[in-house]
Image: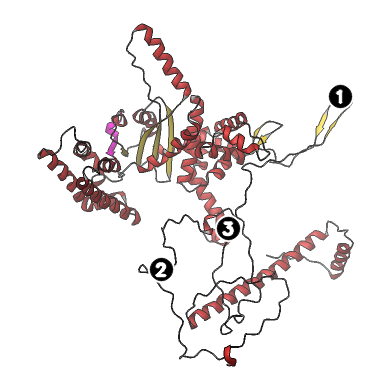
Amino acid sequence: MAKTIEITLNDLRGTSQRIKHQSLDPSDWPIIDALVDARVGREEKKQDRLERKAADAFAAEAARAAVVPGDVIEADYRSLDDEPEESASPPEPEGGATHESPSATTPKPDEPKKTSDGRLKGETAKGDGHGRNGNSAYTSAQHVFHALVNVIGMLCARCGKANMTVYRKKVTIRIVGQPIFAATCHHFEQARCRMCGRIVQAKAPPGTLDGIGTSYIVYHWTACAMLAVLHYIGGMPFKRLELLHAGWGIPMPDANQWRVVNEGDDLLLLLFAALERWGMRTATSLRIDDTGAVILQVLREIKAQLAALRPLDEKADVRNGINTTGVHLETPAGIVILYYSGLHHAGEILDLLWKHRLGVDATLAKVTDGANKNFDHGIIDKLIEAICNAHAFLKFRAIKDMYPDEYALAGAVYKEVFDNDDIAKAEGMTPEARRDFHAVESKPQMLKLLAMCQQKVADRLVEPNSPLWVPVSFIINQWPRLTLFCEKPGVPLDTNLVEQDLIAVSRYLGASFNYQTTTGSGVGDRYMSLVMSARANGAEPVAYLANCLENHEDLKKRPEHYLPWAYAARMKEQAKPPDAVQQT
């Protein structure tokens, strides 16, 4: 909105003279600001009027006749401030005939051909897997607009029979290469007293040197966040990142990288604790599973224990299972994803986390695979313990070549069950309504699978040494746990989500091979937990971590304000247009 100021004509003339002589006074800037704002407002109104006029013309043209897609041609364009050129006269029709308006007897152009699913011929169907992203996916891209001048509303230069109307915009995404981290050298002038040696240094603007580091090099909060995401989620080892960045002329020593993420982790400890506490306290369902991990410090301790027992002829009963446990929690506020690496299994992690659940009356629905260690905990009576149906189906898929009929039946049953669950999600059913829906639609399908397995055993068509024994015995033995989703509200069908969460751990170990120490594995677990939880709740991980690090003092006072869903809600609110914010 243009600013309004009171000024006389003589004052304006004086300002004009000072502009010509390049000798402006401080009092001139409010005048110039108001004049520029007024000019911007006028230009914006002109642009709005032109856009509305073009839209009205397009609507009128579309109502008069169907728009037929034509050939795409490249038209010259100029700035909107350029003077318009005279429009070219329409070409003469072939044979010297005069130009006439289309009549009712004029044959209509062929309509675009459509495929059987209603798409235009050549149009890509949704979900075809072409791998391209729409321009809306580039949320952080800058936008440059190129305008057509003396084209829209003018007579077509090719056919000379119709006017050019507004067509959908053509968007081309331009990607440029750049270093991952950028560096800025700040040169501070200094003065020194010859007598006492006092040194005075020029000051930088507030916030310029915020971050982690020393008086010689500072890593800004955004650099800390980017480094953590690249290393722990992207699987980029510190040494590889150092070698890569050296080619861009910005050294990133691996020792410095570890120091940055380690100090950043110290600032985020309270946030991770709040995420863990909130997740367990308010969770309605829990998925948990293990994947193998390598921690060199723990391996050395295991080898030392084995070496100490060997001279004593003691039985080498030394625990050696190093795991990363993934925990996927669904809460009313959002998703919580947690990681724990060490010499433990999922059941023991569940016992440790249960301290946050004390005093909560609601029963927690837990789903995991059929491994015994996942049920080795002390809170069996406080959980609804279900088994993953996806694992049950995978046991049939493993023998599909040898037993195609049994695999086909299991596949048909589970397709129906999972389709029913998708319907329940799409319709937004409550946990109770979803349970009742599965009891009616899915339970009969599951009974078909159970009947087949029982029939195989009763007719002696399967024996313990047979490959078919594994899936058949699994269905029969785990039947109550497999069908809990039909009996109790809120019980998940599978552990697919936590299996997907554990891909981050596999990616990291696939690139870095191991953690050096338990301190390093703890830092990695906490960063992975924060980043994966941010992604699950629609928050951009780098921006989220940078915001939390930048506000670490406030985070200590109210960590719940920086939980992923709270941050995502604030960013969504800030992204609304000003008028939309005022209306809410």
Report the magenta residues as a range. Answer: 378-388
Identify which residue is drawn at 69% across, 33% down.
Answer: 217
Q: How crowded is mark 2: few (under 14 residues within 10 Å), some or many (20 or more)?
A: some
Give SS at disc 1: loop
Q: Nearer the viewer, mark 1 or mark 2?
A: 2
Name the quadrant containing residue 424: bottom left
Q: Mark 2 points at which residue?
A: 119
Q: Point out the residue furthest to the left here.
A: 459
Colour scheme of this structure image? Answer: secondary structure
Q: Which circle's residue, 1 or 3, is located before the other in the chain?
A: 3
Q: Could you say whether the residue bearing mark 3 is in a helix, strand or loop?
A: loop
The residue at the point 63 percent across, 34 percent down is 252
Q: Percent position (x, y) of residue 416?
A: 26, 52
Label 1 to label 3, Cα distance in Å?
60 Å
Q: Determine whether label 1 and label 3 are within 8 Å by CB.
A: no
Rendered image: mark on residue 374: none
Question: Few, some or many C-alpha atoms within 10 Å of disc 3 (few <14, some 14-19, many ≥20)?
Answer: few
Q: Name the residue under label 1.
A: 196
Rendered image: mark on residue 173: 3
